[in-house]
Amino acid sequence: MGIFKRMKEDMNVVFEQDPAARTYFEVFLTYSGLHAIWSHRVAHALYKRNFFFIARVISQFNRFFTGIEIHPGAKIGRRFFIDHGMGVVIGETCEIGDNVTIYQGVTLGGTGKEKGKRHPTVKDNALIATGAKVLGSITIGESSKVGGGSVVLRDVPDHSTVVGIPGRVVVQNGEKVRKNLDHHKLPDPVSERCDKLQKEIDILRAEIKKLKEED
């Protein structure tokens, strides 16, 4: 696909995803997510040809003008849509499929522990909502959704919805995932610690009593 056809395809995605979009001229000039994706394609092409410094410079200019930081090493598929992208961070070894949508404040980052592939893989048709943090070399499954503000540290199966901190699957293949709601069985660390101390005191008392009897 040629450059201009790809750019038109990107703008068509904006019209599909954002009801506020009115004209191609407006979208071309004012959508920072679109500008970030286009800049990334240039930086990524240079990065693959080992022009690492120039690629990083372009990515930093991209960050300055759009508020979106995409490492030039990240692999991004077609029809990628960033809505209100301020604060979005996409790491070096990220792999993003086709028809993926992410919102402002999303981080696709690492945990600081891995080497090599250390950032997430996001499969086709996934959606990651506002403020979500997806960390580590994990996979967000095809057509899955990550709720706003969630922190995801484990793989997400295909066709699932994840919410919470840490992220938990609440819907999979259109059905709610049953959770244990026995609130009265929640652990009480203070009570458990007191019980343990009481047992140790009882043992010491028994030993002292035994020593007195021997004397």
Image (spheres, rainbow, N blue to C red):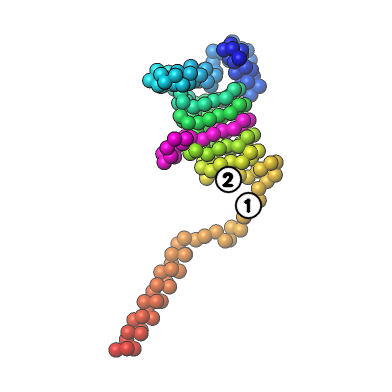
Write down the residue under mark 1: 179
* Viewer-side residue, 188 vs 89: 89
Q: Position of residue 157 (x, y in %)?
A: 61, 41
Span shown in magenta: 109-130
Displayed quadrant of residue 162: top right
Which amino acid is tagged 1? Lys
Q: Are marks 2 and 1 in contact (CB under 8 Å)?
A: yes
Residue at coordinates 45% horizontally, 69% vertically from top-left? 195
Residue bearing the label numbered 2: 168
Quick one: which residue is furthest to the front in this view? 49
Which secondary structure, mark 1?
loop
158 to 206, vertically: above or below: above
Query: Where the N terminus falls, by quadrant?
Result: top right
- Which one is in front, 153 or 118? 118
| Residue lying furthest left | 215
Along the viewing direction, whichever of 78 and 163 lies nearer the viewer = 78
Residue 188 percent across, percent down from the top left: 49, 61
**Label 2 CA crowd tier, 10 Å (few <14, some 14–19, many 20+):** many
In the image, residue 38 lies at what x, y percent? 52, 17
Q: Name the residue at 53% across, 43% down.
A: 154
Horizontally, residue 188 falls left or right of residue 183, namely: left
Label 2 to label 1, Cα distance in Å? 10 Å
Magenta stretch prevailing secondary structure? loop
At a point 32% along the width and 88% down the height, the residue shown is 214
Q: Position of residue 59 (x, y in %)?
A: 44, 21
Question: SS at mark 2?
Answer: strand
Give me the disc on residue 83. none
Q: Which quadrant holds residue 63? A: top left
